[in-house]
Image (cartoon, rainbow, N blue to C red):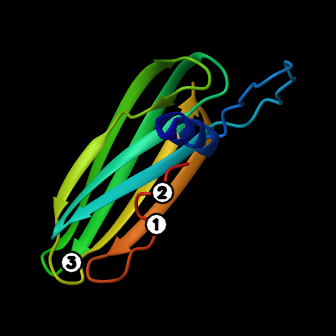
Amino acid sequence: MPHLIASIKHLAAFGLPLLMGAPSMALAQPPKADIIMHLTGNQLSIEDAIRVTEAGEYKVQLEVRKTGKSGTATTRQGNRIKAEADRVYQTSQLHFVLGAKDHIEAKLSLFSEDTLLVTKTRSYTFGAPAPDMNKQL
C-alpha cells in the first residue's frame, strides 16, 4: 500500500489528473519542464524532465554554462521526441566535476516546431546550500 500512495503522489506532482470514482473532466494544462540536479561530492549531474499535454513531435534543448577559475564552458544537448500526452520524458543527462565556487547555469527549452512552449532555468554555485535540487515538476 505505501508504494501505491507514493505512486499516486508522484503522479500528482507532475500534474497528471487522477480519476477515482466517477469520471471527471480534466482541464488541459500547459506543458511542464524541469531541471533536476544531483550532487555527489564534487560531481553534479543534470537531467531534464518534460511533460506535454498533447501527443506530437517536440524539440527539447538543454544548455548548461559552467563558469569558474578555469574559464567558461557551454554545453548544449538537443533532442527531438515523439511524445505521448501526460507522460514524463527525460532526454538529456550531463555530468560535471566542480571546483570551489564553480557556477552552473542551466536552461531547458521545449519547442513544438519553431514555437517555444516553455523554458526553465536553474543555477547552482558549488559550496552553497542547494535546497530542493532534486525537486521535479
Q: Is residue 124 left or right of residue 34?
A: left
In x, y percent, where is residue 122? 46, 63
Q: Is residue 97 left or right of residue 127?
A: left
Task: Tell me which label, 1 or 3, sits earlier in the chain.
Answer: 3
Q: Examine the image and state in which quarter residue 102 appears.
A: bottom left
Name the residue at 33% across, 83% down. Answer: 128
Label 3 sits on what residue type? Answer: Gly
Examine the rendered structure and indicate whether residue 33 appears above or below residue 54. below
Q: Examine the image and state in which quarter residue 51 appears.
A: top right
Q: Cβ–Cβ below 8 Å for labels 2 and 1?
A: yes
Name the residue at 36% across, 72% down. Answer: 124
Task: Tell me which label, 3 or 2, sits earlier in the chain.
Answer: 3
Q: Would you name the residue on which mark 1 appears?
A: 132
In x, y percent, where is residue 24? 86, 23
Label 3 and label 2: CA atoms lie apart by 25 Å
Numbered mark located on residue 135 in the image = 2
Label 2 sits on what residue type? Answer: Lys
Q: Dot 3: few (<14), some (14–19), or many (≥20) neighbours within 10 Å?
A: some
Label 1 and label 3: CA atoms lie apart by 23 Å
- Closest to the camera, between mark 1 and mark 3, is 1
Numbered mark located on residue 68 in the image = 3
